[in-house]
Amino acid sequence: MKLGIRTISYIPVAGCADFGKLPPGTKFDLSSFLPSPPTVLPFTPATADFTEQWTYDAGGRRSDISLVADIRANREDYRPVLQQLTGRRHIFLVETIDGQKYIIGSPSYPATFTWSDSISGISRQAFSIRVVCRSLHGALFSV
């Protein structure tokens, strides 16, 4: 679903208070759980997609959350940043153009970050990022 995403930011799980037991759809002040402000990712807005899908099976219900976007930043400077995000536990925050803030991941259910480097044609060079999270609480909302 295209939400008109304004910002994508992240913060390491280390030092965050656990908010993973909140009921789905809970609105709360995320900043009170964080040891420092999130870091913003410089993505290309028209490329960002956020999806949340609820599944019910024998194990109960769960939420599968996905965020994809392209980053067209200075390649030499930004590659190390993406490499540092890979394989580490993070929480991601997505803010839409209407001010809604979706939280992807928690200390209990951290998001997984992956990326790829793509060059096509003569004008398109981008890092493609993907953030996924499977959780019991789904995407929470920050006020």
Image (cartoon, grey):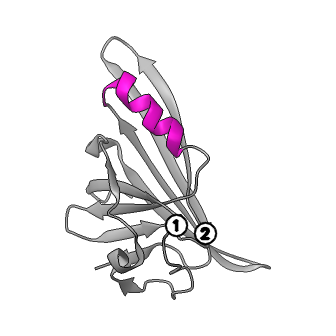
Residue bearing the label numbered 2: 109
Q: Main secondary structure of the magenta part?
A: helix
For residue 69, which quarter of the picture?
top left
Q: Residue furthest right?
A: 58
Nearer the observer, 113 or 17: 17
112 lies above or below 121: below
* Label pair 2/1, CB-CB below 8 angstroms: yes
Image coordinates for residue 61, horizontal then vertical, percent: 66, 80
Q: Which residues are magenta?
A: 73-85
Image coordinates for residue 50, horizontal then vertical, percent: 42, 57
Residue bearing the label numbered 1: 105
For residue 122, which quarter of the picture?
top left
Residue sitting at x 39%, y 58%: 1
Binning the other alpha carbons within 10 Å of mark 2 as few (below 14), some (14 to 19) or many (20 upward) gives many
Three-letter amino acid code of the residue under disc 1: Gly
Please tell me how many numbered marks the rendered image carries: 2
120 lies above or below 37: above
